Image (tube, rainbow, N blue to C red):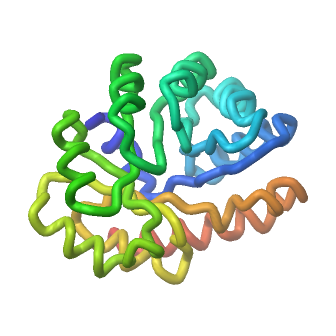
Amino acid sequence: MSLLIDELSKHRLVPVIDLDDVHLAAWLADLLVELELPVAEVTLRSKSAIEVLGAMKTRQPSLLVGAGTVLSPQQSDEAKAAGADFMVSPGLNPKVVEAVLKNDIPMIPGVNNPSQIEQAMSLGLSAVKFFPAEASGGVGFLKAILAPYRELKVMPTGGINLSNIRSYLELPQVFACGGSWFVNKNLIESGDRYRIGEMIIQAKMLIHQIDS
């Protein structure tokens, strides 16, 4: 887990991708690597999601590809077989966490209250996803619930965009944020490489300002 956190901390931004068409995976993987944001979380929300994940990893082996919305042990097995480097879930299901860890893959489950945080810690996890971030109270609520858990690392996701990402990344325990505003399905399906690239560059510039 520590190696994954170290790697994601370098980029501070995890593209959250919901994609049905496997034929679009290759150029998207190329673009992320080209723009030096070699990480992606492919949500398992479509029948083709596992294929998309596998196609992105095959196209760009250096791309750190995570499986998102992992809801069952079976999905974790399928994602591992497709080449997933890490897994993310919207909630905290001990059976899913145990299945993922049994496969020797880092797991970042979703939480939004202290009880779930403590349950994650009891399962041996050192990082969680704060989800849905904005709907759960935003950065103020996150800062409050993290106060007793100073060693915990957090990846806020849900409602994150260019206008609020700074407030999250400025929290010491936040190692990265998940975001989809710059890789939304409409942009990908329309093949708008320029707009996607433009927004990635904007985000990277802001992150550089925060971290410098």
Q: Is residue 98 visible?
A: yes
Residue 181 rendering spot, x and y as whole percentages? 65, 68
In the rendered image, the vertical position of residue 97 relative to residue 27, given as above or below: above
In the rendered image, the vertical position of residue 170 relative to residue 56, given as above or below: below
Q: Is residue 133 left or right of residue 114?
A: right
Residue 93 rendering spot, x and y as whole percentages? 38, 39
Residue 179 falls in image quadrant: bottom right
207, 77: nearer the viewer: 77
Q: Is residue 126 left or right of residue 54?
A: left
In the rendered image, the vertical position of residue 20 relative to residue 148, given as above or below: above
The residue sitting at 28% across, 62% down in the picture is: 113
The residue sitting at 41% across, 77% down in the picture is: 166
The residue sitting at 37% across, 60% down in the picture is: 130
Which quarter of the figure is the N terminus placed in?
A: top left
204, 168: nearer the viewer: 168
Q: Is residue 66 visible?
A: no
The residue sitting at 86% across, 54% down in the picture is: 189
Residue 191 rendering spot, x and y as whole percentages? 87, 55
Residue 81 rendering spot, x and y as whole percentages? 59, 16
Instruction: Name the residue furthest right.
Output: 190
